[in-house]
Image (tube, rainbow, N blue to C red):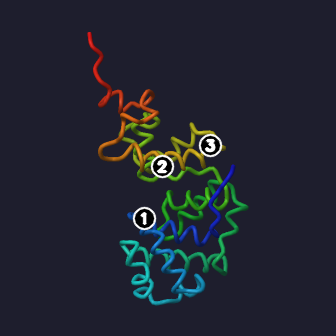
């Protein structure tokens, strides 16, 4: 499996927590602000939470994210003796997923991103774009929750396709299959799309 992102695992974890409920632009603003304000993640862990929150204000929901970042860093240090999650590389996919999601503030999507991008493990992060596009295509049913979607999609997607498919689904959701006003007229997937067939396709003339 080819993984193109190369952030250290702790950086990827923090970055992904910052990505929650915000845009990529604001996510990176918060991340770079942290990297400029603190030399190490140890310093982030030891800093006053209010100071960390103010540093990442641009990421949105900054107080919640500061609490989650410090809590997860603290739990990692307590468990392994330092801020290093390299032990995940030696775990199988499910064990690693369980380990990460047991951290405070780390859900399946966040854990899957870290495992996919940093360790090449075949986990499919289901963000809002992946969830929306796969439902519209009919890969999962319309009433499938995001939590239910991940194992269902991983069952039908070959492991060596998970990384590239995740990237393409996210890009397609942002650029074409938008939540509001999807660009069905220029979508190359419309011939196999349940959403288009049910709501957009012109009625054939009798």
Q: Quadrant of residue 53?
A: bottom left
- Residue contact between numbered discs 1 and 2, judged by CB atoms under 8 Å: no
Q: Residue furthest right?
A: 90
Give the camera-side residue of 121 and 97: 121
Q: Which residue has dot 2 on it?
A: 171
Q: Quadrant of residue 11?
A: bottom right
Residue at x-position 47% and y-position 35%: 139
Q: Residue furthest front?
A: 186
Q: Mark 3 and mark 2: span between their CA atoms?
A: 15 Å
Q: How many marks?
A: 3
Quadrant containing the C terminus is top left
Give the camera-side residue of 183 and 42: 183
Point out the tag, 1 or 3, that comes first from the N-terminus. 1
- Residue 59: percent from the left, percent from the top? 40, 72
Point out the tag, 1 or 2, that comes first from the N-terminus. 1
Mark linked to residue 20:
1
Q: Which residue has dot 3 on it?
A: 161
- Label 2 packing within 10 angstroms: few (<14), some (14-19), many (20+): some
**SS at badge 3:** helix
Residue at x-position 39% and y-position 84%: 54
**SS at badge 1:** loop
**SS at badge 2:** helix
- Residue 79: percent from the left, percent from the top? 63, 76
Looking at the image, residue 91 sits to the left or right of residue 162; the answer is: right
Residue at x-position 46% and y-position 33%: 188
Q: Mark 1 and mark 3: span between their CA atoms?
A: 25 Å
């Amino acid at each position: 499996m080819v993984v193109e992102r190369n952030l250290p695992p702790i950086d990827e974890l923090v970055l992904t927590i910052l990505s929650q409920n915000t845009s990529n632009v604001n996510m990176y603003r918060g991340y770079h602000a942290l990297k400029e304000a603190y030399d190490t993640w140890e310093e982030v862990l030891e800093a006053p939470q209010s100071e960390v929150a103010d540093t990442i204000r641009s990421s949105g929901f900054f107080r919640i994210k500061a609490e989650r970042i410090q809590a997860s860093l603290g739990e990692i240090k307590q468990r392994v003796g330092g801020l290093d999650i390299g032990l995940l590389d030696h775990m199988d996919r499910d064990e690693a997923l369980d380990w990460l999601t047991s951290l405070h503030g780390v859900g399946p999507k966040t854990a899957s991103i870290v495992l996919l991008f940093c360790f090449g493990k075949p986990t499919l992060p289901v963000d809002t774009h992946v969830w929306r596009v796969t439902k519209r295509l009919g890969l999962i049913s319309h009433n499938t929750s995001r939590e239910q979607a991940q194992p269902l999609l991983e069952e039908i997607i070959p492991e060596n396709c998970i990384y590239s498919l995740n990237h393409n689904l996210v890009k397609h959701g942002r650029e074409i299959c938008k939540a509001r006003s999807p660009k069905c007229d220029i979508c190359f997937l419309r011939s196999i799309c349940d959403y288009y067939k049910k709501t957009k396709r012109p009625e054939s003339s009798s």
